Image (cartoon, coloured by chain):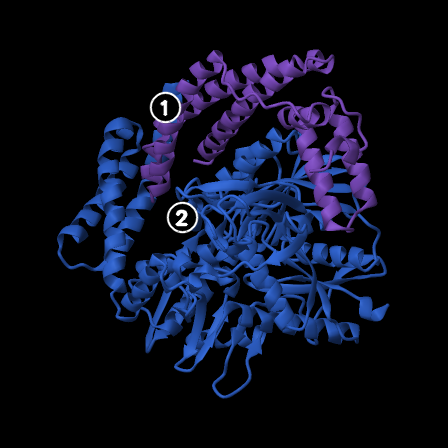
Chain colours: A purple, B blue
Amino acid sequence: MRNPFALLGLPETLLLDPASVEEAWRDLSREGNDGDETEASALNRARTVLSDPVTRLAAWLEVKAPDLVPNRAIAPGLMDLFSKIGPVLATTDSVLARHRKATTALARAMLAKEAIAAQLAVQDLLAQIQSLKSAQTDRYAEFEAGDLESASRALGQLKFLKRWEEQCRERLLALIAT
Amino acid sequence: MDDELIIGIDLGTTHSLVGVVDSGFPIILADGKGERLLPSCVTWPVGQPPLVGTEAMRSRILAPGRTVTSIKRFMGRTFADLSNEEREETPYRLVPGERGEILVRLDETTLLSPEEISALILARLREIASEALEMPVTRAVVTVPAYFNHSQREATRRAAERAGLTVERILNEPTAAALAYGLDRLGDSATVAVFDLGGGTFDLSVLQMRDGFFEVIATAGDTRLGGDDLDRTLARFLAETLALGDLSGSEEALLLIRAREAKEALSSEELVTVRLPFFRGEESYEIELTRERFERLALPLIDRTGPICRRAFAEAAAKGASTVERLILVGGSTRIPLVREKLTEWFGLDPDLSQHPDEAVALGAAIQAGMLCGRVRQILLVDVTPLSLGIETFGGLMNVIIARNSTIPVKAGELFTNAVDGQESMAIRVLQGERELAKDNWLLGEVVVPFTPGPKGSARVGVQFAINRNGILEVLARDTTTGEDHLLEIRDSAVDVEDEAVERMISESIDYAFDDMKERVWTEAKFKSEELLPAVTEALELVGDRLEAEDRNEIERTAARVRAVLESGSHDANALKSANAALDEATQTLAALLVEAAFEEMA
C-alpha cells in the first residue's frame, strides 16, 4: 500500500487532526472527481486509514520503522477484559438468534427484557474498551518523540482492542435494530 | 454533442420514469399521451408482441398468468432465496431455472428471466425518451435501491444493455433523491436523511451536505419491503373478511387492484367503500374500510422501517456525522399518513415533504446524467457500499474484506498461497452481508485463483476486491512474480450440481410442482401457532393486568380460534394462517406492553 500520509499530502505525524485529513481528502477528491477509480480508491483508503487512530499508528510505524518486528503479546489488563467479552457476546448472540427466528411481534416482545440487559452489558464493555484505547492513544506524543518500541507494543494492544470494539459495536447495532 | 446525451432512469417496482437535463434543469419526459409515469408492467397477448405500461395494466385481470408486475423484486436473486410466500404471491408463475435462477413461466414453452422483462420496460423508456427528444438515445444512468447487492446491480445493468442502453452509472435511489433535493441548496451545510419507501423496497441513507459536496455516510434498507406488501396484506384481509375462500388468478388480481386503490384513497379519506360488483358470477361484494382499520393492518410493516433507520443513524453518528436535521421523504408509500406520523413519533423530526414522492429519484438520475455529459455543473457526490463484502473461510465463516458503508470506489487486497504441492488453483466463495456464518449471507459467486504449480507455499497471488462507483464488484488477481493483473470471473456458483443446496432446491421445486406446497404452508403456519400460543399465555401472566378488557377478550377469542383449527385435524393451511394473522394482530398491544414493562424494569 502507498504511504497514506504522502498520498494525502499530510505530514507524517501521529498527531494528525481529523479535520485536516478530511480537508485533504476532499480537495484531492474534488480534483479527481469521476476520474480514475484506482486513484479514487487509494484516496478513500488513505482517508480511512488516517482517520482511525489505530490504523494511523500502524501506517506511521510502517513509515518510521518498517523493519520493526510487530509485538503481539497480550498485556495482563487486556486478558481480564477478554475473559469478560466472550460470555457477553455469547449471551447477546443467543438473544439475537432467537429474535431472528421469532415471526410475531409478541414473540419478539418476550425477548425485550433480555435484549435490554444484553445492550447494557455490551455498552459497559464498550466503555471499558474505549478507556483502555484512550490510555494508549494518549501516549501518541510520547511515541512521536521517538519511543518506537513502546509504539509497537501499543499497536499490538490497540489491534486487539479495535477488534473487540468492532465486535461489540456490531452486537450493539444488531440490538438497536431489535 | 447530441449523441453524448445521457438520460436518467428510475426503474421502479410499480412504475418507472425517464428524465433528462434541459437548459440546466432536470425534467421528466412524457410519452405521446402526456404520461410521465410508466407502470412497470408487461403483458404477452397470445401470438402478439408484448405490451408495456398502461396497456399492459389492463391485462392484469384478464390474463393474470401472462401479465407481470413488480419484477424488480426478483432481479439478481436465486429461486432458493425466495420464501414460500414469495413463490406463491405473484399471479404469474415463478420456476427455478437450470442454474437456480428465477424464471417467469408464461406458458408451456415460454420462460423469461427478470432481466429480459426489465429490459422491455427499459426499452420502452428509451423509446419514450427518443420520441420526446427527437433523437436516438443510447446512454443512461439507472437507479437501484441503495441496499441492492452486487448481483442485483449486475442484473439491472445487464437488463439495460439488453435494452440497447450503455449504463454510464448505477445510482442509488436515495442518493438520487438527495441530488434532486440539494440541487438548489448547494450552499447548505446539513446532515440529512432520505427515507425512501417505494413499491417494493425500502432504503434509508444519511448524507452530509457541505460546500456543494454530497457524501453518503451510512445506508441501510430492506429490499423486500414496500407498498406491494401493504396491498397484499389488505387484499388478504378483504378476502378473509368477505369470506371469499379460494381465489382464482383473476380474482386475486382484481382484489389486489381494489386493495391498492383503497390504500391510496385512505391517504386522504377517513373511510372508503371497496366494491366488487359481480365478483364471482352474480355475486357482488361491498365493504367499508376505515383508515384506522387499514393502519392497524399496515403498522407491523411500517414498524419494520424504524429499526433500520435507527441502525443507519447510529452508524452515521459513529462515523462522526452530526445529528440528522432533516428527514426527506420520497417513494409513493410515504404518502401514507401513518408513515409520517410514525417518523415524527420515533425521531422527533417533521418530515420534509418538498420532494415529489414519485419523481425525485428520476430527477436525481437526470441530474447525475447531466453531470456526466456536462449539462449541469459538477457536484461532488460520494456514496458507500451498503453491505460488507467478504470471503468464506474454511470453518464456513465470513471473513470481511470491505466493511459496509465504506466509501466507494474501494479496493482491498488479500494474499493467497497454494496449500499443497503442485496445486493449480483455489476457489474462493465471495459473499455480501453482515452475518457471521457464510451461509447466512448472499453468495455472489465463486472466483478461481490460478497458481503457478510449485511446492506448497511457493505460489503467491494477490487478489484485489474492488467495488466501483456503481457498487459493482470486480475481482483482480496479481501474480506477484510477473506483477500482472487480470480480471477474475465471478462465476455463478449455483451451476455446481454437486452442491447440496442446489439439490435441495431442485427437490423443493419438484415438491412445489407436485403441490406439496399446502403441507409446507401448514407446517409453517403450525410453527407460528406454536410460537404464539405459549407466548400469549406467558405474556398475559406478566402484563395481562395492564390490558383493556376488550383487548383481552379479543386475544382470548383469537387464541381459542387458533387452538381450534390446530386441533380440528383438518390440516387447513389457509384457515390456520388467517387464525394466526388474527391472533398476531390482536396481540400487538400486548407486545407493546411487554416492551414497556421490560424498559421500566431495567430503568
Return the residue nearer the eye: B428 or B588. B428
Q: Return the mark for residue A87.
A: 1
Residue B540, image quadrant: top left
Q: Chain of mark 2?
A: B
Three-letter residue code for mark 1:
Pro
* Residue B594 position (above or below residue B58): above
Return the residue nearer the eye: B324 or B514. B514
* Residue B144 position (above or below residue A171): below
Who's the residue at 43% across and 21% down the image?
A120
Is residue B188 visible in this depiction of the protein?
no
Who's the residue at 49% across and 88% down the image?
B47
**Where is residue B113 drawn, in percent x and y?**
49, 70
CA gap between label 2 and label 1 equals 24 Å
Q: Chain of mark 1?
A: A
SS under mark 2: helix
Three-letter residue code for mark 2:
Lys
* Residue A23 position (above or below residue A40): above
Q: Is residue B544 left or right of residue B464?
A: left
Who's the residue at 84% across and 51% down the image?
B377
Q: Categorize mark 2 by other alpha carbons within 10 Å: few (<14), some (14-19), many (20+).
A: few
Return the residue nearer the eye: B48 or B430. B430
**Where is residue B325 drawn, in percent x and y?**
66, 34
- Residue behind mark 2: B439
Is residue B157 visible in this depiction of the protein?
yes
